Image (tube, coloured by chain):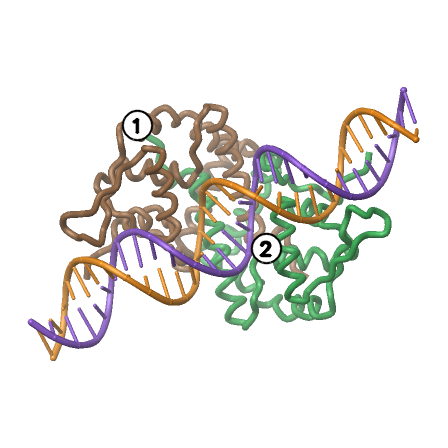
Chain colours: A green, B brown, C orange, D purple
Amino acid sequence: MIDLFNTPGHMARRFQQIAVAAFQLEVERGGFDLTPVQYVALATLALHKGIDQASLAALIAHDRTTMGGVIDRLESKGLLSRRISDQDRRARELEITPAGRQLLKKIEPYVQKAQDDMLCGLSKTEARHLLTLLGKALAGANDLSRAPLKASAPMRK
Amino acid sequence: MIDLFNTPGHMARRFQQIAVAAFQLEVERGGFDLTPVQYVALATLALHKGIDQASLAALIAHDRTTMGGVIDRLESKGLLSRRISDQDRRARELEITPAGRQLLKKIEPYVQKAQDDMLCGLSKTEARHLLTLLGKALAGANDLSRAPLKASAPMRK
DNA sequence: TACTGATCATCAGTATAAATATTATATCAA
DNA sequence: TTGATATAATATTTATACTGATGATCAGTA
């Protein structure tokens, strides 16, 4: 019989569950209304002006279908704008709005606090060690998920 | 600016994403139709005959509401049965069916394989170390999530 | 030009996850 | 026993995540 509670699968789910809860808690404490995924998408967009949805999804290892909904919600909050690309009429060019940029700046300390919170049971050294091992595991198993992480925007062959 | 890709939050999401994908892949390869959550619920039920939904949810650190849907799907697959408790007519007593028990037995090697897959980037020693650190982090931050893990079924005050 | 294959976005469907409200039932305290 | 409180399950809403399919468009080629 498998010892469920010590499997990487079960621990992965718990860790993610705690990560989301910590994020929500801190961000709400700051008076913001933003989910973890929305934050990551917006923060990444801030660094990649004019990127399209599929490329953004690839950058943060998200499914492109899921990303559509995330973008919708960010757009309706006025945090980004979306327009059809001149170069490629299939693609939507995304751009962060001034409101989005301002939100990112104000929310950052709360996000940082949440990151610390979820590792509160570990020493500084242990925390660093955990992130290193986790990073190595992710790199090794990256291709297993539908939305593997790509180092940069997908190449045109 | 936060380095998103090395935050515990982002890594937690990726790790969970890969865990689910590895599980689906192996389980499908074995010809089964079961999600990770459904598996954990069923395997835990096998060890706790006659438990009610809320207690099962608490045992595996799941939200009560979410568990309702999971149970529904397991019931419709004929893997468990549900009846109103004699002791407490609010509660539904759950019991794994013979079909459920048989499925658990047959699916186990595939589940085990998935657990190995998601750590394929690590050596045996590193994998053990990662699980230890992850366990310690979870214990320290357990109370942050809405569905904290409880050692046993919730106590009656 | 017409064809082929790939890509971008979207849609429908299923499942997980949590928050909130409601209903039914228990339990405790006055 | 009654009234307050707690709990079990359900329903509803919002958000994430993936599968498979479709339509529009693009790039390269015959």
**Which residue is the site of mark 2?**
A37
- Foreground: A155 or C5? C5
Q: Which residue is mark 1?
A: B99
Compare residues C21 and B51 and report the one nearer the observer: C21
The quadrant holding residue B51 is top left
Q: Is residue B122 above or below residue A29?
A: above
Q: Quadrant of residue D1?
A: bottom left
Query: In which chain is the residue bearing label 2?
Result: A
Measured as percent of width and height from the top left, residue B17 is found at 54, 42
Give the tally of numbered discs: 2
At a point 46% along the width and 46% down the height, the residue shown is A13
Instruction: Give the x, y percent position of residue A143.
Output: 62, 34
| Mark 1 residue crowding within 10 angstroms, few (<14) / some (14–19) / many (20+) | few
- Left or right: residue A66 versus residue A17 is right
The residue at the point 22 percent across, 54 percent down is B90
**In this orientation, which residue lies closer to the viewer: B32 or B120?**
B32
